Image: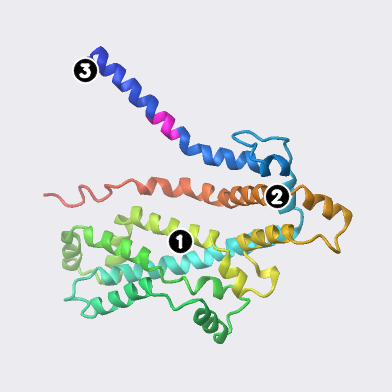
Amino acid sequence: MGIRLSASERVFGIVVIIILSLLGLSTLFPLVHILAVSFSDKAAASGGLVTVYPVHFTLVSYKAVMADSAFFHAFGVSVERVLLGGAIQFVLTIVSAYALSRPKSEFRSRDVYMWVLVFTMIFSGGLIPTYLTIKSLHMLDTMWSLVLPTAVAVFNIIVLMNFFKSLPKELDEAAVIDGSGPWHKLWAIYFPLSLPSIATVTLFSVVGHWNAFFDGLIYMNDPNHYPLQTYLNQIIVQAAQPTTNMTPDEIERLSKLSDRTMNAAKILVSMVPILVIYPFLQRYFITGITLGSVKE
C-alpha cells in the first residue's frame, strides 16, 4: 500500500523537482556556450553575440586544429603520456599509500616519510631548479620529462592513505591469521575494497596528464614532441602573431580565427578523451563497497 501524500506535499515535491532540474540544466550551460562559440565566426565571438547557439556557423576553428598531421601526432604523444605517466603514478600512489597507512609498529619511519611528502606538497623547488634537474638528467625532449616530475602525487597518496586507514582492521587481522604477507594483503584485500578511491585518484592522474601543457612547452625543444595541449596552445600563439611570410590562404584562414573560438575548440577537443573514460570510472565512485565486509 503506497503512502498517500497531501496536496501541499505533492506541490512541494513538484517544486523541488523543477528547481533541481533547472540547477542541473544550468551546469550544462557553460558547455553548451563553449560549443556554440567554437562553431561561430570571429566577429560574433569577439562581439559577445554568442549564447547557446552558433552565430554564423563555421568550422574554421576545428579545421585549423585538425588541418595537418601534427595535430594527430600531438594527440598520440598525449595518449602515450597518459598511459605511461598514469601507470607509473598509479603504482607509486597505491604502494606509498598502503605503506603510510600501516601502524608505526609495522613501519617505524612512517611519520618521517609522511612529513617529507607533506613538505614537498607545501614547498616547491621552483621552476628553474626543476628545469636544471631535468636537464642534468638528460631528460629534455623525452617523454620522461613529462611523467617523472609528477610521478609521486602527494595529494592522491594522502587521499588513498586515508581510505586504507578507514578499512576495518579485522580484515587485516584475518589476513595475517591466514598467513598473508604485505603484498598479498595489498593486492588481494586492500586493492579490491578500495576501487572507489583508486578510481578517483586515477581520474585525477589522467586529467592532470591530459590537461598539462606548460611542462611540454619548457621541456620540449622539438615541436614534434609537444603533447596535445601544448600543440593547441601554440596554435593560438601563432594565430596572434603577425601574418608575414604566409600564403594568402593562411592569411585568410587566420583572419577568421579568434582567441575565443580557438580556445573553445581546444576545450572541446580536450574534453573528448575524458568524457570517454569517465563513464567507465563513474560506477566506482559509489561508496559503501566495504559495507557488510565485516559482520558485527
Q: Residue at x 31, y 57 (%)?
A: 194
Q: Is residue 21 left or right of residue 268?
A: left
Mark found first going from the N terminus, 2 or 3: 3
Q: Is residue 117 left or right of residue 257?
A: left
Q: Position of residue 99 (x, y in %)?
A: 28, 72
Q: Is residue 227 left or right of residue 189?
A: right
Q: Position of residue 95 (x, y in %)?
A: 34, 70
Q: Is residue 290 above or below residue 215?
A: above
Q: Residue at x 31, y 68 (%)?
A: 97
Asked if disc 1 and disc 3 are in contact, CB closer than 8 Å, the reply is no
Q: Residue at x 40, y 68 (%)?
A: 153
Residue 258: assigned label? 2
Q: Residue at x 23, y 13 (%)?
A: 6
Q: Is residue 39 visible?
A: no
Residue 16 highlighted magenta (yes or no) = no
Mark found first going from the N terminus, 1 or 3: 3
Q: Residue beneath label 3, please? A: 3
Secondary structure category for the residue under label 1: helix
Segment tinted magenta in the rendering: 20-24
Question: Which amino acid, by three-letter code, is at mark 2?
Answer: Ser
Question: Of all residues shown, which one is farthest toward the left?
Answer: 296
- In the image shown, does 171 or 235 lie closer to the viewer? 235
Q: Nearer the viewer, mark 2 or mark 3?
A: 2
Question: Of all residues shown, which one is farthest toward the front?
Answer: 47
Question: Which amino acid, by three-letter code, is at mark 3?
Answer: Ile
